[in-house]
Amino acid sequence: MLMHPENLHSLKDDMVAFIAGHGLRRMPAYVTEEVPTVLFEEDNPDGWKDFVEHAKAANAAFVTMSEVVLEKADVAILIEQLRDHTFSDEEELDLDDAEALIKHVGKTGYLQLGFAHQGIMFLFETSTDWYDRFQDLMEAATDLGGVVLDERDE
């Protein structure tokens, strides 16, 4: 996506209306990485419209739609995990970034559209910059939490 809004809620509303306008149904569902997928690539901010038109052309019965709204509890858990494992200046910056996410609570940061065709899920995904950073921090916190020290090495 060329533009980088802070909240994808209005984009979601536009998608809902556009999908309905094309006579397609929406099913609230998230398509996981375990499902065979093809990711739609488009550098046009309205590329998602092309995606919906592809779904219609493929005679898709419905389009899946998933969104992620940042919850206060998600940020709190992230901050707690980072605080428990902060040892370096770089990790301290991660903690600062996590605390800055508080201003995005209640905002939509990620949207996924999908449709099935010939056993493959075709996906369109978009996210905000802050959501991408949130995901990076969650991954870092998970990796830090997985570090196990062997007492014999001390």
Image (tube, rainbow, N blue to C red):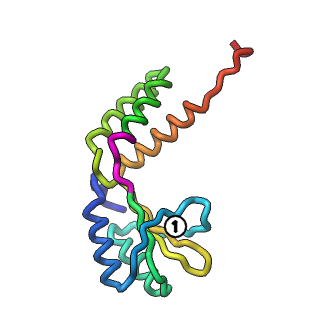
Give, as a single range, the part of the protein colored magenta: 68-74
Residue furthest toward the top? 154
**Which amino acid type is shown beneath numbered disc 1?**
Leu
Say few, some or many: other residues with alpha carbon within 10 Å of mark 1 (under 14 / 14 to 19 / 20 or more).
few
How far from the left and from the top, in percent, is residue 81? 46, 31
Front in this rendered view, residue 54 or 71: 71
How far from the left and from the top, in percent, is residue 19? 35, 78
In the rendered structure, does residue 133 fall within the stretch colored magenta? no
Q: Is residue 32 above or below residue 99?
A: below
How far from the left and from the top, in percent, is residue 13? 27, 68
Q: Is residue 49 above or below residue 143?
A: below
How far from the left and from the top, in percent, is residue 115? 49, 75
Q: Which structural element holds mark 1? A: strand
Q: Is residue 84 left or right of residue 153?
A: left
Residue at image coords 46%, 87%: 57
Front in this rendered view, residue 7 or 71: 71
Residue at image coords 51%, 36%: 140
Residue furthest toward the right? 152
Residue at image coords 36%, 49%: 129
Front in this rendered view, residue 2 or 93: 93
In the rendered structure, does residue 72 fall within the stretch colored magenta? yes
Q: Is residue 134 left or right of residue 18?
A: right
Residue at image coords 36%, 62%: 1
Q: Is residue 122 left or right of residue 51?
A: right
Q: Which residue is mark 1?
A: 39
